Image (tube, rainbow, N blue to C red):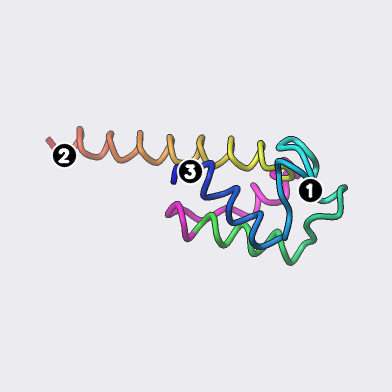
């Protein structure tokens, strides 16, 4: 299962929604009543555990992680940053 599917599956299981039937990937999940602040914290904890990085408070408070699409983009960007940093560490060590 790829990154997008893991995020989607967690959200569908945790929040009892179906992105194909109930909401679109770009739907604001707070405004749609799908997720509340407690659910948001659970989601951020899942992302941190699943993808190996901590979601900073600044990221959570910027109000951009409100849709499946935005969350997927955030995780993709963060994992790319981490991969680039690791690549730099390997290059520096050589």
Give the x, y percent position of residue 30: 82, 51
Give whichever of 27, 51 is nearer the camera. 27
Tell me the SS state at disc 1.
loop
Give the x, y percent position of residue 93: 16, 39
Image depth: mark 2 or mark 1 in front: 1
Tell me the SS state at disc 2.
helix
Q: Residue furthest front?
A: 21
Which residue is the site of mark 1? 29
The relative height of residue 87 versus residue 56 in the rendered view (above or below) is above
Q: Quadrant of residue 34?
A: bottom right
Closer to the N terminus: mark 3 or mark 1? 3
Disc assigned to residue 44:
none
Give the x, y percent position of residue 43: 63, 58
Tell me the SS state at disc 3.
helix
Q: Residue at x 47, y 61 (%)?
A: 49
Q: Determine crowd level at label 3: few under 14, some 14-19, many 20+ residues with C-alpha closer than 10 A.
A: few
Q: Determine crowd level at label 1: few under 14, some 14-19, many 20+ residues with C-alpha closer than 10 A.
A: some
Q: Residue furthest bottom?
A: 38
The magenta-colored residue range is 49-65
Image depth: mark 2 or mark 3 in front: 3
Q: Residue at x 71, y 41 (%)?
A: 20
Q: Quadrant of the C terminus?
A: top left
Closer to the N terminus: mark 2 or mark 3? 3
Q: Determine crowd level at label 2: few under 14, some 14-19, many 20+ residues with C-alpha closer than 10 A.
A: few
Which residue is the site of mark 3? 3
Is residue 83 shown left or right of residue 87?
right
Q: Residue furthest left?
A: 94
Q: Residue at x 64, y 60 (%)?
A: 13
Label 2 and label 1: CA atoms lie apart by: 43 Å
Which residue is the site of mark 2? 93
The relative height of residue 5 versus residue 17 in the rendered view (above or below) is above
Give the x, y percent position of residue 31: 87, 48
């Amino acid at each position: 299962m790829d990154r997008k599917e893991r995020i989607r599956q967690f959200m569908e299981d945790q929040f009892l929604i179906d992105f194909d039937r109930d909401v679109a990937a770009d739907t604001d999940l707070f405004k749609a009543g799908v997720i509340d602040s407690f659910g948001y914290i659970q989601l951020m904890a899942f992302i941190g555990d699943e993808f190996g990085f901590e979601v900073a408070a600044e990221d959570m408070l910027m109000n951009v992680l409100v849709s499946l699409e935005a969350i997927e983009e955030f995780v993709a960007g963060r994992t790319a940053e981490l991969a680039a940093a690791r690549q730099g560490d390997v290059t520096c060590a050589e």
